[in-house]
Image (spheres, grey):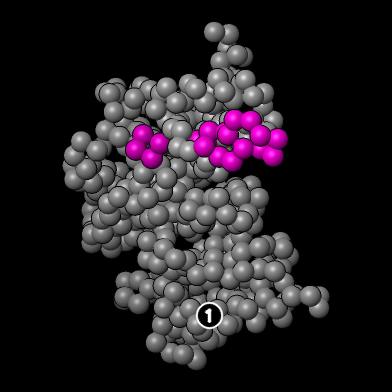
């Protein structure tokens, strides 16, 4: 097959897969119209994916007003493969196993602390324990998403730096992903939360939003990080995570900060340490956070604001302040149209988001594995398309 024809075939397969994953129960005709492809092209791709067992026909839709045959609706076969999402924190990790529809099948939470060992050995050790727990199901694993705080280029799979995990200039692709028989991708924790909302609301009306992840560390060791308070922001535009020119979009420091402490806000470290227990200090923190967020929301005309992290314990307090500040910052008489949502994933927002990020990556950039993955034994066979995509994206 000529290279150009092969590329077009792979691209069309990827586009069809992604369309049906994002909008389940599309018909062949609807998919062709959505993608601007010939019906015959889409039918050929769909038939190939049905034969491979990636897609399945699930129902017949309504006939058109003109009558005729009712279209057959399609969806990704949920049991074709599995993905794992992981959240790494200095004192513990969480993990969740999901099918291709995003349903959580199994979860893990355990205290763990990286002592003297290197990060590679530390993370691979955790993954090996999880794989052992999976048993035969590990052969259906398509990939792992790993989320943590820090500056992370998820396209090149590189960690520029992570203060919580004590990392600097870490080649995640070489040190972690290349050592396992499936792709493993690192992502910033706030961005992972945004991926979670994109993935689990992918068929809904959520297109342009911020995800604000607020962590309020009350332990003595936790207060050494930014005075105990850490805020990260994930930015989504037109249903796509915006990474920024240097993959630092969402890194944040308050406009009111003038060197008062080591953190991101105008509170000094002692004041930041009291936010969780002092209502007056908490109101001051929430007000400053809301004023910064309001500017971004209104300037970018975003339709949703998602809030997650430790502040979920104070939803009533923070929700009122956010609404007040967004309205106060809006310069027109008509009210701003931004829905404020608190994450329904609670403490699992980061780990579900990491799984969602991996799902999104699989259904884009021509990296979805073909054939029966459960009968594969060679790592090169599983990773070849993914690693080619990593190289291709890194060269853009």
Q: Which residue is mark 1?
A: 318
Pick the residue in front: 257 or 181. 181
Q: Position of residue 96 (x, y in %)?
A: 32, 52
Residue 180: quarter of image: top left
Mark 1 crowd level (few <14, some 14–19, many ≥20, 10 Å Cα): many
Q: Position of residue 26 (x, y in %)?
A: 56, 38
Pick the residue in front: 278 or 56. 56
Residue, x 59% and y 66% (percent of image)?
A: 305
Q: Position of residue 25 (x, y in %)?
A: 52, 41
Residue, x 60% and y 14% (percent of image)?
A: 5
Residue 352: quarter of image: bottom left
Residue, x 61% and y 21% (percent of image)?
A: 41
Tell me which segment is drawn in magenta: 60-80
Pick the residue in front: 182 or 220. 182
Q: Is residue 178 left or right of residue 158?
A: left
Query: Does residue 67 belong to the magenta stretch?
Result: yes
Q: Position of residue 126 (x, y in %)?
A: 24, 48
Residue 204: quarter of image: bottom right
Query: Does residue 58 belong to the magenta stretch?
Result: no
Residue, x 64% and y 47% (percent of image)?
A: 245
Pick the residue in front: 224 or 92. 92
């Amino acid at each position: 097959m000529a290279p150009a024809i092969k590329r077009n075939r792979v691209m069309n397969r990827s586009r069809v897969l992604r369309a049906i994953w994002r909008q389940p129960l599309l018909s062949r005709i609807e998919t062709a119209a959505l993608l601007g492809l010939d019906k015959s092209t889409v039918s050929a791709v769909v038939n190939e994916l049905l034969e491979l067992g990636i897609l399945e026909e699930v129902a017949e839709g309504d006939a058109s007003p003109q009558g005729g045959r009712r279209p057959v609706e399609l969806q990704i076969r949920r049991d074709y493969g599995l993905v794992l999402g992981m959240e790494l924190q200095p004192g513990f990790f969480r993990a969740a196993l999901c099918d291709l529809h995003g349903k959580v099948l199994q979860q893990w939470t355990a205290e763990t602390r990286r002592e003297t060992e290197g990060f590679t050995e530390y993370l691979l050790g955790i993954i090996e324990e999880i794989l052992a727990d999976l048993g035969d199901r590990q052969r259906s694993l398509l990939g792992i998403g790993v989320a943590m705080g820090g500056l992370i280029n998820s396209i090149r799979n590189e960690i520029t730096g992570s203060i919580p995990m004590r990392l600097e200039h870490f080649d995640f692709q070489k040190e972690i992903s290349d050592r396992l028989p499936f792709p493993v991708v690192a992502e910033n924790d706030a961005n992972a939360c945004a991926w979670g909302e994109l993935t689990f609301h992918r068929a809904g009306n959520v297109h342009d939003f911020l995800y604000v992840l607020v962590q309020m560390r009350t332990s003595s060791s936790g207060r050494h990080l930014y005075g105990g308070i850490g805020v990260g922001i994930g930015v989504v535009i037109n249903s796509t995570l915006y990474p920024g020119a240097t993959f630092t979009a969402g890194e944040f420091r308050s406009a009111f900060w003038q060197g008062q402490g080591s953190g991101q806000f105008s509170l000094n470290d002692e004041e930041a340490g009291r936010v969780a227990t002092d209502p007056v200090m908490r109101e001051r923190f929430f007000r400053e956070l809301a004023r910064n967020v309001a500017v971004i929301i209104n300037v970018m005309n975003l339709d949703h604001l998602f809030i997650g992290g430790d502040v979920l314990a104070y939803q009533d307090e923070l929700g009122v302040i956010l609404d007040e500040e967004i309205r106060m910052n809006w310069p027109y008489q008509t009210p701003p149209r931004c829905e404020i949502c608190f994450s329904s994933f609670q403490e699992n927002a980061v780990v579900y988001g990491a799984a969602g990020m991996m799902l999104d990556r699989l259904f884009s950039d021509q990296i979805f594995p073909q054939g029966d993955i459960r009968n594969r034994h060679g790592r090169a066979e599983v990773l070849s398309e993914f690693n080619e995509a990593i190289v291709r994206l890194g060269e853009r």
